Amino acid sequence: MKFGLVMEGGAMRGLFTAGVTDVLMENGITFDSSVGVSAGACFGCNYKSGQHGRAIRYNIRFREDKRYCSWNSYFRTGDMFGAEFCYHTIPEKLDLFDNDFYEANPMTFFVVGTDINTGRAVYHNCRTAKGDDLEWIRASASMPLVSRIVKIDGREFLDGGISDSIPLRFMESTGCDRNVVILTQPRGFVKTQSRTLGLVKLRYGRKYPELVRAFSERPKMYNEELRYISAAENAGRAFVIAPPEKLPIGHVEHDMDKLLEVYRIGRNAAKARLAELKEFMKTE
């Protein structure tokens, strides 16, 4: 029996996931494999590095730092979430990322990127959190319109959530028999077309038509994935942890109370189902 962990994105809704995974770490719950999308990649890597509390800590500490997330950063660097500050200055100098523990941890950690020339999802096993592996994490979280395109090995990528928002099927394809799925939207949520579709067409349509196609088809893809997850849950193959209601936070958030509240909601959601989760993860 192999166990997998699937972590949805959602920008700062990802602090719900951080709350859940911190509770899992506190209770010694481990997985054979994991996959993170967008914020699920950025915050989820702390699960593999064993750094309980790190995601909420640096988000609180740097919430008002213009180098971390601001329009100032966007106009200066092309990234609303400053690439150099977020992916190098913080983990290398200000809130150290434990690369040694990460690499020693046997759990595999995949991230999802969207190849903007094909519009298709690409899954990468981040064996380290350095070099190109770190670029894959950045690519997974690079939201269209407010991020630069990330180039890796001659290919171009943006946010993995465009092409595969909740990759349970992928986790199953790696051989994981039972999977825990952390959602950042409440049960019953139905995705509708993004109001930014027109801007995406204007910005990328001429050079990257397949990206625009994937973006426009995202609601259909996302809602179908929710149906698949529900069926897997009913069949006993998936265990879903979701917010009890819409999270009180936007894609970008500087309010400390809101950041802490979403993290707390995640912790409470995990605690409420901890006994059920432990039963789900029994190998007998």
Image: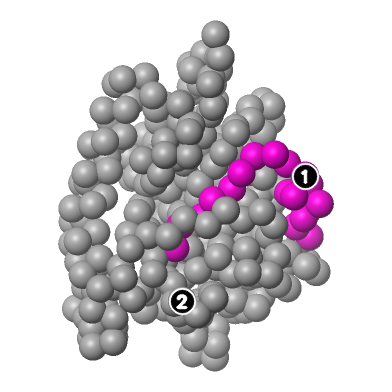
Magenta-tinted stretch: 96-113
Q: Position of residue 150 (x, y in %)?
A: 50, 77
Q: Is residue 280 above or below residue 86?
A: above
Q: What is the number of callouts on the image?
A: 2
Q: Residue furthest top?
A: 284
Residue assigned mark 2: 155
Q: Front-most of 158 and 17?
A: 158
Q: Residue furthest bottom?
A: 76
Q: Which image quadrant is residue 267 in?
A: top right
Q: Residue at x 18, y 53 (%)?
A: 220
Q: Is residue 252 above or below residue 262?
A: below
Q: Quadrant of the C terminus?
A: top right
Number of the label disc, if any, that sits on residue 76 = none
For label 2, the SS is strand
Looking at the image, tell me whether mark 1 or mark 2 is earlier in sequence order: 1
For label 1, the SS is helix
Q: Position of residue 234 (x, y in %)?
A: 29, 21
Q: Which amino acid type is marked by label 1?
A: Ala
Task: Calculate the distance from the C-alpha at mark 1 to the C-alpha at mark 2.
Answer: 29 Å
Query: Given this view, does label 1 or label 2 mark the residue nearer the observer?
Result: 2
Q: Position of residue 188 (x, y in %)?
A: 23, 37
Q: Front-most of 249 and 213?
A: 213
Q: Residue at x 77, y 55 (%)?
A: 99
User: In the figure, is residue 91 to the left or right of 264?
Assistant: right
- Magenta-drawn stretch contains 100: yes
Q: Is residue 238 above or below residue 192?
A: above
- Residue 269 visible in image: no
Number of the label disc, if any, that sits on residue 104 = 1
User: In the figure, is residue 88 to the left or right of 189?
Assistant: right
- Magenta-drawn stretch contains 76: no
Q: Which amino acid type is marked by label 2?
A: Arg
